Image: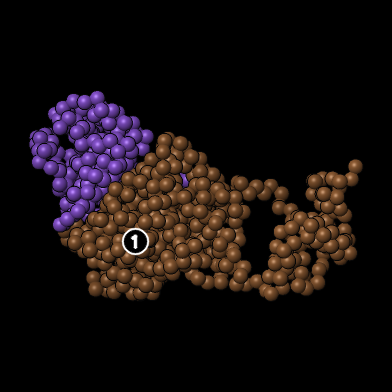
Amino acid sequence: MSGLPQTLRIQQPPPGFDPGASKVAKAARHATLQRSAAIAEVANWEDLRARAKVIRAYTLEHIDVLLQQLEVNFRGAGGVVHYASDARSACTILLDLARQHGVRRVVKSKSMVSEELEVNEAIQRAGLEVVETDLGEFIIQLAGERPSHITAPAIHKSTEEIATLLSRHLGESLPPDPQALLLAARAYLRKRFLDAEMGIIGVNFAVAETGTLVVVENEGNARLVSTLPRLLVAIMGIEKVTPALLDLATFLRLLPRSATGQVMTSYVSLISGPYPGQELHLIVVDNGRRRILGDPTVREILHCIRCGACMNVCPVYRIIGGHAYGWVYTGPMGAILSPLLLNAETTSDLPFASTLCGACREACPVDIDLPRLLLELRRRAASKVSTPSERWMMSTWAFAGKSRERFSVGGKLVRRFLRVARNLGSVQRLFPPLAGWTISRDLPLPPAQSFRERWRKP
Amino acid sequence: MNARLGFVDRFKAQVEAAGGKVVVCRSREEAVGVVRQELYRRNLREVLGGGLGGRWASLKESLESWGAKLLETPPRLTPDGIPEVGIGEAEYAVAETGTLVEVAWHRERLLSSLLPPVHIALLDEDRIVPDLDSLFVVLLPLLSQGPRPRVVCITGPSRSADIEKLLILGAHGPRELIVVLSPP
């Protein structure tokens, strides 16, 4: 305690509070350990990251040609391609398909873009039943929540909470035992799979060269969704396209290891066209992505392959969890992607929820410079919302900080000023425009002399 | 030959690491025997084996002579209409990752490795490729024109860790995977 100024009014956490003991923090630590072990086995991990980065950059550079190639090949294999500029048009395409086929029941596998488009809400508004079939997504659908993590959506829930939730919805009393809960959910969902007339899947990669949609998963629900219903609709953001089939060798080495520490997930489905008797549609969604593409300083965020490694290693995410990010994408990548996709003031403070420690960049399998992007978005947010007086203060600060003489003179002035402005040993109230600073905190009193002055004295 | 043996060892180790089992057989007859034994052990007379290729005609005969039925499709598409065991052929396998690769031209072919709780995969030794790069080189011509097959890569049984990161085998797909490996 001795090193800290006595005057700092730090709010004490409740007794027994351990930020590292939360469900989210534990899960994130666990995932990080698994990831490190899986990466240690790969001799050329950095080469893989570098190669992936080149492929992703090439893809964004040539995205129109690649999307066209994807469309031609997907059609050649018997599928139908639709383009949607925003959430509303994507949902309209989806609902029209459902109506044409007389669909009443829909099963869905995990897809972040469908969360973004609020596909479930649209389907339910149209009076159809839609069931999420990934266990974690199923749990949060029952709870009426949003995912708190992109690869482990229900990670904030305890086994007991899940047992209560499933017991209520499945109409049987289930013990708080993960195995029993999984079995009950499996039996309930199996019936839904067999009855559904339409399946909706997300897409991890779409290979332009062959028109192949790639779906990476562990549970087998995406296989069931893409195999059982006779009408299958895949939804992807434009940035999911990749030039060549051989690119998958790189991405499939990076993605499972980064996401869950697995060498390979249980299932990787390569869907190139429908099987005989099936109808296959692909909805390619823009929803703000082209705007990001046209913004060269930030377009790197579209390299993201949605593994979730950046959130697992993020010290801020570990403490505050995914829901604090307020939208579907969470953690460091969410703090960048959400404000850019939404283009809205409401999420412009997300880039500030970071310590800029750089752990996210180190963990990123495609080497996205996340700290740089966070800083860039902070700069933009600041230039938009700051007041003239704030800007004046910042430029004064910059002016003073650029020369040693100015800095020490300025420091002396500020120290003298603050010692005058003090009351009760700390600065508790400043006048406008500085008042904002002291509304919710005290400014600790600066020492009478600077470090240099003390150093000079014998 | 030595390289090939290396593939088998690596493949076996990786399947086991992913929670599956590999039975290495010296002949196709032995492989047929292993399948029969798995069914016998479970006291089963019905097994799902949609789209099993002509190369495995001997398995079909053997099962039938023993009184077991190899079903093309599940008797009923209801939760209780699905046999305990499904048998499928893996066209390729990847040593690097312990992955089985199924190439399906129709829906039935996709069900036997998906719906039953136990999946027995038949694999010829010479179908193991060293790594993912080789796999996609092999798959490219298949996926390049005309009607394309559905390709499913399978690594271990299905699993979920969605409840407090606790790994549980057997989510929506099989909880048990047995690879029966035999010479071509």
Relative to residue A323, is residue A12 drawn left or right?
A: right
In-front residue for pair A62/A355: A62
Label 1 secondary element: loop
Q: Is residue A280 visible?
A: no
The residue closer to the viewer here, B137 or A275, is B137
Q: Which residue is mark 1?
A: A62
Residue A391 drawn at (x, y percent): 68, 70
Q: Is residue A424 left or right of residue A441?
A: right
- Identify the residue shown where x is 75% and y is 61%: A400
Disc 1 crowd rating (10 Å Cα; few below 14, some 14-19, many 20+) is few
x, y percentage for residue B119? 26, 41
Q: Chain of mark 1?
A: A
Residue A263 figure quarter: top left
* Residue at the image point whose x is 42% and y is 65% from the top: A293
Asked if residue B59 shows in the view, the reply is yes
Vertical placement of residue A342 versus B183, above or below:
below
Question: Where A91 falls versus A418 (above or below)?
Answer: below
Residue A254: give x, y in percent of width and height: 40, 46
Q: Which chain is brown?
A: A
A280 is higher (above) or lower (below) than A151: below
Q: Colour of chain B?
A: purple
